[in-house]
Amino acid sequence: MTLAPLPASSRHPSAAERAVTPESDMSEIPAAFCGRRYHAYNDWAKTHHGGRLQKISVDAGFTCPNRDGALGRGGCSFCNNAGFTPSYLREQRDIRRQIDTGIAFMRRRYPETAGFLAYFQSYSNTYGDLEQLRRMYGKALAHPDIRGLVIGTRPDCLPNATLDYLADLARERPVELEIGIESCDDAVLAACRRGHDFAASADAIQRAAQRGLFVTGHLLLGLPLETPAGLIQGAQALSRLPIDALKFHQLQIVRGTRLAVQYRRAPDSIALLSPPAYLDAVIDMLEYLPPSVKIQRLGSEVPPRLRLSPDWGLRLSRFPALLEARLRERDTWQSRRFRRAPEEGANGEGAAGMKKTP
């Protein structure tokens, strides 16, 4: 799916438009934002689940069609799964023991946690036959401290039978589906050897939402060929989809990837974002997103031993405050430029009758 040119009214904000402006009336900002200028997932979760649910990473031994030869070999140009896999997952393969270790750590770090979700995070966690999925998810759900599942995967690894099964689970337990969109621009997706286009992501999101599943999309900002106008187009495209939440990540050059090889050969060939540029890129997208979309993550951290560049010297925990400060400086907020599509009614139903998730 190739993005159409932006209309003049939706162009990338100029430097003047990004400058500090007189603060607007806070009453314009949705009450659901709980005093912030964006809709934080944690605020929503505390209300929806009665407290914070902490995700416990699980590695069930899945792989990816972009690694095993079904689509390609070596994975996406930016991907080295070790960059975001907790060390305890490499030390033990038993799912029950992984969960026990993860919960013990999280209870020490977040004693106020209300409960735990098993987070199938590594690679594509719906890339397998249905019986394999039932077996792996069942092991996690059998743990007495696990209330539900979070399942990370690719949009092209979600056949209807798998979505039907997840929808059945979601009738009794919390189930969140995380889909790696990465970019809404087909040229960017092709350049990073993703193996699917944006239409595949849109289709997967729609089919999951039709079954009532909570859907989170992952976006990776700063990929080669990305443009500021393309990010805004992407936000507008996402605003027309029944997506519940988003996770933002900044591009990092991780050892063992194709981008790492390119970076070593020609560092200037990859224009890495600085923290201020990244925050502005996130805000440029937030402005066009509907207020219903929850923001789950604002960045990511790769272990220093695996990260070639950039070294921002920032902990992930600082991102919310930095984003809030920059939103205030720009006197803007999530959904400020969002406009409901003409074919949508006040209840969020589009021409196809698909209801947007709350």
Image (cartoon, rainbow, N blue to C red):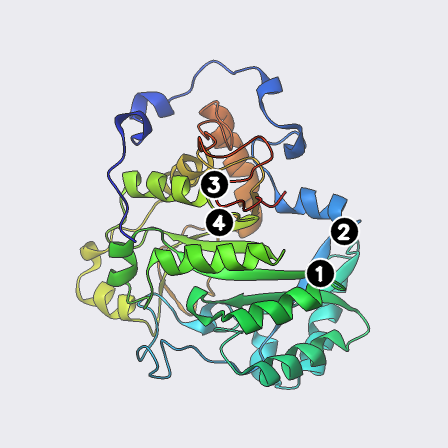
- Gap between marks 1 and 2, in whole Å? 9 Å
Instruction: Determine which residue is flagged by label 3.
Output: 351
Residue under the image location 28 percent in, 66 percent down: 259
- For badge 4, the amino acid type reads Leu
- For badge 1, the amino acid type reads Pro
- Gap between marks 1 and 4, in whole Å? 32 Å
**Considering depth in this image, is 22 or 65 the residue closer to the camera?**
65
Say whether disc 1 or disc 4 marks the residue closer to the N-terminus. 1
- The C terminus is located in which quarter? top right
The image shows residue 122 at horizontal and vertical percentages of: 52, 73
Q: Quadrant of residue 105?
A: bottom right
Say whether disc 3 or disc 1 marks the residue closer to the N-terminus. 1
Instruction: Determine which residue is flagged by label 1.
Output: 174
- Gap between marks 3 and 4, in whole Å? 44 Å
Say whether disc 3 or disc 4 marks the residue closer to the N-terminus. 4
**In this view, the mark in front (3 or 4):** 3
Instruction: Determine which residue is flagged by label 4.
Output: 314
Query: Alpha-carbon neighbours of circle 1 within 10 Å: few (<14), some, or many (≥20)?
Result: some
**In this view, the mark in front (1 or 2):** 1
Instruction: Determine which residue is flagged by label 2.
Output: 49
- Is 211 located above or below residue 353 in the figure? below
**In this view, the mark in front (3 or 1):** 3
Query: Alpha-carbon neighbours of circle 2 within 10 Å: few (<14), some, or many (≥20)?
Result: few
